[in-house]
């Protein structure tokens, strides 16, 4: 199986954007979504690395074939979605590896901070939401997760012509939303941009829920200009991309009546920045009034 370990090592040695992941709701006061995360750790010795099921060459071929449609849709609509981006066995492997990372204690409870008019912060725990930042030290447990991240981080930016996406840095989060009605509030991923040192431009999510059924909830709701909304089920293998600095979104309640880890909603998010800072929060953007 073709696997560019050198590419993986190179991608994971790049600086990770270590700022807290900022989420500002477009209703009420700003929220700063946080998760207590460890620092990046080095990749394990290449001689001991397990081989992933994921074939990076096939994923690159898939991304290359989709790239023109992704670029066009981002420029015209602000988002793009396709399903599935990965074959079912790989999605199942990535979900199993996510569960294994959670069993190792790599996940922490997520919480938000509301900033009041006086600038004081108050913490609000996000019940049922946990997250971690996978890094090179997780490769032995989660080779497919890391192979996917490496391929997207190194190969996707140059494929998206005219979008101004850079592969110079990245930030990633693996999140699980438990059943019982857990939600993510309405927010924009990068609301402050350069003022906060945040250059994230593109949000890329892949969902790891191969057995999701009707009624399991957890849809990603994108808010569009004119008041329209678009609900995207988090089905296994679905890829969703949208502008981090523009598109308001939320996660609808997960499996209100469900119990058990089979109802857990797993999502792997990669944020990619732009080096063209004038692209952030363009004043004539169709989403400017929604941020």
Image (spheres, grey):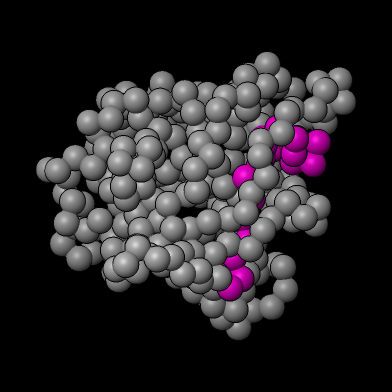
User: In the image, 271: left or right of 87?
Assistant: left
Residue 137 in picture, x, y percent from top left:
75, 35
- Which segment did they paint magenta? 126-146
- The reply to whether residue 147 is visible in this rendering is yes
User: In the image, 88: left or right of 22?
Assistant: right
Q: Residue furthest bottom?
A: 257
Residue 4 in picture, x, y percent from top left:
67, 18
Residue located 22% across and 58% down the image: 290
Q: Residue furthest top?
A: 6
| Total marks placed | 0
Q: Quadrant of residue 248?
A: bottom left
Q: Is residue 61 found inside the magenta-colored segment of the image?
A: no
Residue 158 in picture, x, y percent from top left:
41, 21
Q: Residue furthest left?
A: 284
Residue located 40% across and 25% down the image: 166
Q: Quadrant of residue 212?
A: bottom right
User: In the image, 168: left or right of 228?
Assistant: right
Residue located 62% across and 54% down the image: 36
- The reply to whether residue 250 is visible in this rendering is no
Which quadrant, please, contains the C terminus? Answer: bottom left
- Above or below 42: residue 144: below
- Above or below 7: residue 271: below
Which quadrant, please, contains the N terminus? Answer: top right
Q: Quadrant of residue 175?
A: bottom right
**Nearer to us in this view, 185 or 122:** 122
Residue located 77% across and 55% down the image: 105
Q: Is residue 128 found inside the magenta-colored segment of the image?
A: yes
Residue 205 in picture, x, y percent from top left:
49, 47
User: In the image, 165: left or right of 224?
Assistant: right
């Amino acid at each position: 199986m073709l696997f560019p370990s050198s590419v993986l090592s190179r991608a994971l040695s790049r600086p990770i954007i270590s700022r807290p992941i900022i989420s500002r709701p477009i209703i009420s006061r700003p929220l700063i979504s946080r998760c207590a995360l460890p620092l990046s750790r080095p990749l394990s010795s290449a001689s001991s690395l397990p081989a992933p099921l994921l074939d990076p060459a096939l994923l690159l071929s898939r991304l290359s074939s989709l790239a023109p449609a992704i670029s066009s849709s981002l420029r015209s609509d602000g988002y793009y979605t396709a399903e599935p981006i990965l074959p079912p066995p790989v999605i199942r492997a990535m979900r199993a590896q996510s569960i294994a990372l959670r069993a190792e204690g790599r996940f922490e409870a997520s919480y938000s901070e509301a900033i009041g008019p006086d600038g004081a912060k108050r913490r609000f725990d996000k019940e049922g939401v946990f997250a971690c930042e996978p890094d090179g030290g997780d490769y032995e447990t989660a080779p497919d997760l890391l192979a996917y991240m490496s391929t997207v981080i190194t190969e996707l930016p140059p494929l998206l012509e005219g979008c101004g996406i850079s592969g110079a840095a990245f930030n990633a989060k693996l999140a699980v939303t438990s059943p019982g009605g857990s939600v993510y509030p309405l927010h924009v991923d990068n609301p402050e941009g350069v003022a906060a040192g945040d250059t994230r431009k593109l949000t890329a999510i892949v969902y790891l829920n191969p057995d999701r059924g009707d009624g399991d909830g957890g849809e990603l709701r994108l808010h569009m200009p004119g008041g329209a909304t678009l609900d995207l089920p988090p089905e296994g293998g679905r890829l969703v991309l949208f502008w981090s600095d523009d598109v308001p979104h939320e996660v609808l309640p997960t499996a209100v009546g469900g119990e058990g880890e089979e109802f857990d909603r797993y999502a792997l998010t990669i944020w990619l920045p732009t080096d063209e800072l004038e692209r952030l929060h363009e004043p004539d953007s169709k989403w400017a009034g929604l941020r």
